[in-house]
Image (tube, rainbow, N blue to C red):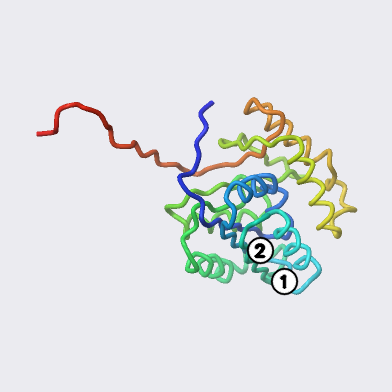
């Protein structure tokens, strides 16, 4: 299995519809990447939950999931469950984030997600970020919409435990939900780990990647 490392990582953009989705889908990856790239700029946009307890939770959580990073979080108050009727405002918000700087990596919902709100954001992202490396995270829920991912980031067991602990620490409003428990998060991580020959992993869908071949070096003849 081939591993690829980004040339540089100066800025990451995190996009979500509901508070907690980014951390659930990519929390372990954020912990690993932020520690590997101290001082990285992390900008986050969440479209719903603004002005509520959920916003407070999200700000606290993303700061914890991005250690050593420069974190800027924007939480809007678009209506939950009605994002399809607010397409213009949602797209403008994503475009505004794009205008703040060129991210090296974008994290966004998966196009396979059947939740109407998440699918709306997933459809908007490639219309704004056409030439960017986009990692589409996955979320386990009642709908049977998980698809086979194409990119994996192995997680050591202590990192997975840290992710689960931070989810429960910062998202107190979600603790009574039947799916919000260590078995859910650890179970999917174990499956994704099996698929990439690791113990645990987070996985992502990547719409497209362009490979660049480095110029050849050596002592051969000069081109004519």
x, y percent for residue 145: 68, 41
Q: Are marks 2 and 1 in contact (CB under 8 Å)?
A: yes
Residue at image position (59%, 59%) is 42
Q: Tell me, for residue 50, which label it has, or none.
A: 1
Q: Residue at x 53, y 70 (%)?
A: 92
- Residue 141 left/right relative to 69: right
In the picture as drawn, the residue positioned furthest to the right comes out as 176
Instruction: Decide if residue 191 is on the left or right side of residue 148.
Output: right
**On screen, residue 7 above or below 17:** above
Residue 108, compared with residue 200, is above or below; it is below
Q: Please name whichever residue, 91 or 202, is drawn nearer the observer in this view of the structure.
A: 202
* Number of marks present in the image shown: 2
The residue at the point 65 percent across, 56 percent down is: 68
Is 141 positioned to the left or the right of 6 in the image? right
Disc 1 crowd rating (10 Å Cα; few below 14, some 14-19, many 20+) is some
* The N terminus lies in quadrant: top right
Looking at the rendering, which quadrant does residue 216 occupy?
top left
If the image is split into quadrants, where does the C terminus sit? top left
Using the image, tell me which numbered label, if any, was put on residue 46: 2
Q: x, y percentage for residue 24? A: 72, 49
| SS category of the residue bearing label 2 | strand
Alpha carbon distance from label 2 to label 1 = 8 Å
Q: Give SS at disc 1.
A: loop
The local crowd at label 2, few if under 14, some if 14 to 19, many if 20 or more residues have their Cα within 10 Å, is many
């Amino acid at each position: 299995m081939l591993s690829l490392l980004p040339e540089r990582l100066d800025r990451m953009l995190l996009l979500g519809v509901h508070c907690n989705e980014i951390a659930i889908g990519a929390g372990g990856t954020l912990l690993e990447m932020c520690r590997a790239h101290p001082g990285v700029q992390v900008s986050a946009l969440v479209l719903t939950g603004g002005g509520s307890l959920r916003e407070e939770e999200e700000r606290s959580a993303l700061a914890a999931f991005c250690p050593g990073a420069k974190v800027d979080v924007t939480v809007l108050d678009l209506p939950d469950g009605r994002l399809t009727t607010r397409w213009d405002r949602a797209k403008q918000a994503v475009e505004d984030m794009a205008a703040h700087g060129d991210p090296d990596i974008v994290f966004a919902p998966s196009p396979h997600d059947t939740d109407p709100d998440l699918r709306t954001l997933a459809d908007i992202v490639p219309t704004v970020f056409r030439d960017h490396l986009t990692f589409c995270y996955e979320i386990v829920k009642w709908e049977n919409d998980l698809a086979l991912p194409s990119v994996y980031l192995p997680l050591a067991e202590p990192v997975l435990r840290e992710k689960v602990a931070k989810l429960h620490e910062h998202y107190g409003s979600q603790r009574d939900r039947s799916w919000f428990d260590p078995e859910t998060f650890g179970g999917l991580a174990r499956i994704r780990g099996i698929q990439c020959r690791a113990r645990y992993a987070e996985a992502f869908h990547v719409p497209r990647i362009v490979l660049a071949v480095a110029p050849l070096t050596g002592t051969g003849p000069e081109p004519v």
